[in-house]
Image: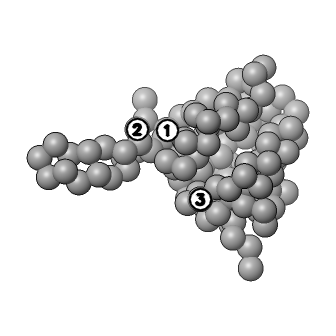
Amino acid sequence: MASLTIDKQGDVYRLSGALDESAKLGGIEATNGMLKLDLSGIKSINSLGVATFLNFVDTWNGAKVEYHGCSTVCVDAMIMLPAFVGPEENTAQIVSFECFYSCPSCRKIEPHLLTP
């Protein structure tokens, strides 16, 4: 069974599960030169998953890319390896992402989705 699932909802591809050595990213294609990826369901990434994703990035062929709902593990990968977002000449945009928020009164730490 695949550890990564891809669901297309309108013009957005939602990736869920683990981005690892078993991940298959085939079938994800730009629509009218635009590729929208919802990464909110990505729960883990390993080094082989990063390599798989970087190979996927090489197939964009100049499409404009938007990242939606980037999970905290995706944000970590983007910080550690900027190529995860795409090549330097890419115009990819991070539209929304999760970051951890620590409540000063109850000390609870939870991820929160940030959007412009």
**First in sequence: mark 3 vs mark 1:** 3
Mark 1 and mark 3 in contact (Cβ < 8 Å)?
no
Q: Residues within 10 Å of mark 3 (few under 14, many from 20)?
A: some
Q: In this image, 68 relative to 33: left or right? A: left
Tell me where residue 77 appears, x and y as whole percent: 61, 42
Evaluate whether residue 7 shows in this view: no
Which quadrant holds the N terminus?
bottom right
Depicted 83 relative to depicted 49: above or below: above
Direction left: furthest residue = 105
Q: CA distance from mark 2 to mark 1?
A: 5 Å
Q: In this image, 60 relative to 85: left or right? A: right
Q: In this image, 64 relative to 76: left or right? A: right
Circle 1: residue type: Ser
Q: CA distance from mark 3 to mark 1?
A: 18 Å
Q: Quadrant of residue 76?
A: top right
Q: Which residue is mark 1?
A: 96
Mark 1 and mark 2 in contact (Cβ < 8 Å)?
yes
Circle 2: residue type: Leu
Q: Which residue is mark 3?
A: 44
**First in sequence: mark 2 vs mark 3:** 3
Q: CA distance from mark 2 to mark 3?
A: 20 Å
Regarding mark 3 in the picture, which secondary structure is present there? strand
Evaluate whether residue 80 shows in this view: yes
Mark 3 and mark 2 in contact (Cβ < 8 Å)?
no
Which is more toward the observer, 9 or 50?
A: 50
Regarding mark 1 in the picture, which secondary structure is present there? loop
Q: Which residue is mark 2?
A: 114
